[in-house]
Amino acid sequence: MDRDQKYNPQVIEPKWQHYWQDNKTYYAKRDDSKPKFYALVMFPYPSGDLHMGHMRNYTIGDVTARYKTMRGYNVMNPMGWDAFGLPAENAAIKDGLHPSVRTLQNIVDMKEQFFKMGICYDWDREVASCLPDYYRWTQWMFLQMYKRDLAYRKNAPANWCPNDQTVLANEQVVNGRCERCGAEVIKKDLTQWFFRITSYADRLIDDLDTLPDWPERVKTMQRNWIGRSHGAKVDFPLVGHEGKITVYTTRPDTIFGATFMVLAPEHPLVAQITTDEQRTAVENYVAEAKRQTEIERMSNEKEKTGAWTGALARNPMTGEDIPVWIADYVLVTYGTGAIMAVPGGDERDYDFALKYDLPIVPVVEPVPNIEPVEKGDPSLAPVLKAGTNVPLYTGAGQMINSGPLDGVPTGESKTTMIKMLEEQGKGEGTVNYRLRDWLISRQRYWGAPIPIVYCSECGEQPVAESDLPVVLPVDVDFRPGGESPLARVESFVNTTCPHCGGPAKRETDTMDTFVDSSWYFLRFCDPHNDSAPFDPAKANYWMGVDQYTGGVEHAILHLMYARFLTKMLADEGMVDVQEPFNRLFTQGMITKDGAKMSKSKGNVVPVDSMVDAQGADTGRLFVLFIGPPDEDAEWNDRGTEGMYRFLNRVWRLFEGDVRVGGSGQDRAISDYSPSDRELLRKVHNTIKKVTDDIDRFHFNTAVSAIMELANAMQAYRDAHGPKTYAFSEAATSVLLLLAPMTPHITAELWEQAGGQGHIHTQPWPAFNAELAAAETIEVAVQVNGKVRDRITLDADASEAEAINAALTSEKVAAIVDGKVVRQALYVAGRLVSIVIG
RNA sequence: GCCGAAGUGGCGGAAUGGCAGACGCGCUCGCCUCAAAAGCGAGUGAGGGUAGCCUCAUGUGGGUUCGAGUCCCACCUUCGGCACCA
């Protein structure tokens, strides 16, 4: 071995990258002699170039997989490509390449970059969602949904992006704009396919409680998104008409204050109940509401507008006839699309009543020291706004002007009223959700075709499972045009009915790419199966994912859809787990100049150039060290230099005849000199800290602990040389501890220093509590809360001994000097606290 | 508006209620060098003192405690999520 070499990552890194690939070091097989560990990083959209933000993401996953391997787990760490979707298609339109060509080239490029970073995956399990052997089973998922009545088609106002010329799921509309391109989204009535995710709303919310290892933040976001609320549906009979208006309310107890009603402009009853005198005004208002984009509707948030239909309905509790209005502050998509307005207790209804001079009846009055009914309820003083002498009160209190409820505290009043409504047949308690069904149709080319056929005789027919895949035709003008590009391909559209064999037409919409990514983690368990999406036995061996790592931007969309599909498959008997991801980690972004790295902002630090300059190990170590991995971190060009210097220091620790891989088990503590003991104490305390930190994903402090160990080793080496048994132990440990994080340099030094086998298949170093224990400890002495001295004690000193030593220390004795010691205590290993009077 | 997270040196950040600022970056001085780079060593929160040391300091103001960056209350600021959801 030539130990005169300098540290040269450009030479050693490719060497080991090829070693891992050639030896398939990280390719997984079933092995029942070990516990399994399924490590997964969210599969990327193959955009081509990776930047340091990506490197952080994949390094965390790679460290996890390598660490768990050393800990004795049978690890599966697969990777694939979320390859369908708008970005590929838009890029393809821009530079004239077919999306499949562009996507497949990007996949090749990105694999190369993974390789250069030393990120090891089981490439035998690679999947790409745009290939027929994958999307065949995405289509199969659709058919299971269809079979279970969880996929259905309906005409509904949909979010339409005029730029991308496709509909979007509610989850893809952000502040009224398209999540992808930022264009203002408009409403368009279209017949679209939906997945009935609302059927799973309760399970999706309740099962969050079975996920203690998910970030609380993500669970809260999902709870809010699903938005479960408890209330009642109440019927208000129409006056002078057949029928009734059913409203949803979370506060049925305030019904005595319901002095008018409001329907959403799109509510189906509007046309029927509007009187001739009011018809023009109502129709104008409905037309205006329809014309507005989401953004316009939100921009006049506070200014309430509406129109009276001319109709009246009867308040079922008061018996009064109250006017029925329409207003766009009531949403047709939430609840029943109709409300009872209680202006005395609801700010929106109050504003509306003031504007249109409608009566206001207070039904709750505050009482002293009332507790809010639910967390988040305001318990404010009543507000009196200009233009009325009746105040608005939205807080808790007791009921007034409410007949039988008078004097009942709010909260209790709600359950009482629901009971009354149910007994009198006027309404019923119900649960309502903000969540709406998942719109999966897309009028775009680059996606999995929806496997449905329309027959003039038999109607809508699912494609037979044996006829999958419905292949996406390649030779297509794929530019968007308001309807799916597939509709222009006659050879695709015209087919035969799976039921009667007669002529029929295919569905031409494709599926939302989030369908593709909602089950890929199951395909990894059995990626080459061509008779089923996966073998349940294999899925049950690997599932659930033990560590799932990705960006917090997927907190709602992907993570909720994946949970939904997993539950559907569990109901189908395909997999045993109810939840796909046991432990979730959401890592922060790496920013530069305060912004997320992106090509358009020109602030990208490419992985390629960084790795070429200083090596993958330096880059990996820096993204681990940059800060707490769940928080955003600002890129600093100088930061990698510190890591490069550190790795050079590690390299130099191994100069000369340093051997690794021995075992100290046959040596007694008494065989070591005091300086050896000190070094070994540091070694074992570092083993404990690094192990704990990696388990907790505190990579930044794990790295700093190893740096401290390296510093201690350098000091020891300077004093005693590298040839002692203790130094060899330390050298062995420092390489093993660093191995998951900087795999190349550690593999090289392990080999050069004569280590047995390959470092990455060695067991993780064992913590030895006896070697870690100190013989003497230094503790602080506080007098009246201020540190006044530090004393050295035996590690096992008793409280009495410690206090006695503290009181007899020169400095403390001078301060105490004759004063009364009121209290003295010893916190073992930490400090002595003395209180004097 | 509601929900949640976070405010610590010049910077990134450490700290199961127990010696605040670990580790790294930057900076200063020194060694090495003809010189530089690299490397190595020392120092580096603020203020005071020749010095031993002392005082102040974790967004602001209170509180609990022998002891608070950490726990409690109120407020300020920043960021994230939801937002006319009845």
Image: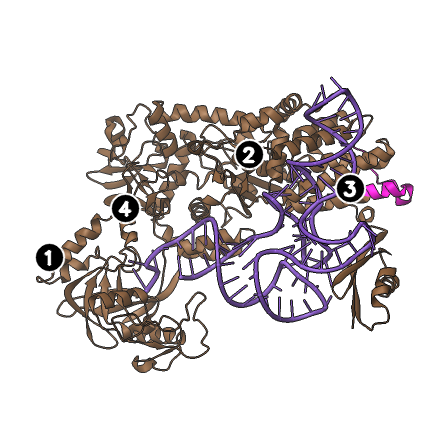
Residue pointed to by mark 1 = A280
At label 4, the amino acid type is Ala
Q: Chain of mark 4?
A: A
Sequence-wise first label, 3 or 1 = 1
Residue at image location 88% in from the left, 44% down from the top: A669
Check disc 4 and report the residue beneath it.
Answer: A158
Tag 3 residue:
A683
The mark lying in front, picked from 1 and 4, is 1
Where's residue A399, x and y in %? 35, 78
Q: Quadrant of residue A378?
A: bottom left
Residue A280, placed above or below residue A519: below
Q: Which residue is mark 2?
A: A55
Residues at discs 1 and 4 in contact (Cβ within 8 Å): no
Disc 2/disc 3 C-alpha distance (Å): 29 Å
Contact flag, marks 2 and 3 (Cβ < 8 Å):
no
Is disc 3 placed on a helix, strand or loop? helix
Inter-mark Cα distance, 3 to 1: 84 Å
Q: Colour of chain B?
A: purple
